[in-house]
Amino acid sequence: MRRQEDALVLLLAGGVGSRLNLLVETRAKPAVSFGGIYRIIDFSLSNVMNSGLTRVGVLTQYKPLSLMNHIGTGESWDFSGRSRGVKILPPRTGSNDSDWYQGTADAIRRNIDFIESNPTDEVVILSGDHIYHMDFAV
């Protein structure tokens, strides 16, 4: 019988969020403050952990520094540990916009090595810039 925590989560968190104008001048949309104490990505990360999913890759791209600093080791969501963790996955390229991910499918394709290095039967692909409550437990 497979365990829930065996699934691998890929959290898409590289969006520009251009409709947010000034809010995204210095940070990616998932790193924008919400309610004064949260970041938008906190909702996705909490949903993942509360669902018993413990292996997460966060695909970043646009102005990722504040997002990377916020997530850190994942300890705030209890992702640090022997069989659990958060891995930040920026594009492995230079600063050229043409080297960036060309969309969701390209972001997944270019991180296939991360998926293959984390054996699983299930990969859950989620957006890191939505505010919602969801239990992904099977």
Image (cartoon, rainbow, N blue to C red):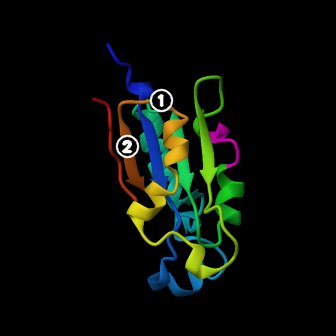
Q: Is residue 43 left or right of residue 97?
A: left
Mark identifier at residue 124: 2
Q: Which residue is located at x 63 percent, y 51 percent?
A: 88
Tell me the element at label 1: loop
Q: Is residue 81 above or below residue 9?
A: above
Q: Is residue 97 above or below residue 86?
A: below
Q: Position of residue 71 (x, y in %)?
A: 64, 50
Q: Position of residue 108 (x, y in %)?
A: 45, 55
Q: Which amino acid type is marked by label 2?
A: Val
Q: Which residue is mark 1?
A: 119
Label 1 neighbourhood size at 10 Å, few (<14), some (14-19), many (20+)? few
Magenta stretch: helix, strand or loop mostly: loop
Q: Nearer the viewer, residue 40 or 138?
A: 138
Q: Which residue is located at x 58 percent, y 86 percent?
A: 22
Tell me the element at label 2: strand
Which residue is most to the top?
1
Q: Which residue is located at x 55 percent, y 52 percent?
A: 58
Q: Position of residue 29 (x, y in %)?
A: 52, 70
Q: Which amino acid type is marked by label 1?
A: Pro
Q: Position of residue 95 (x, y in %)?
A: 69, 76
Q: Which residue is located at x 36 percent, y 54 percent?
A: 132
Count of labels in the image = 2
Which residue is most to the left?
138
Q: Which residues are magenta?
A: 72-76
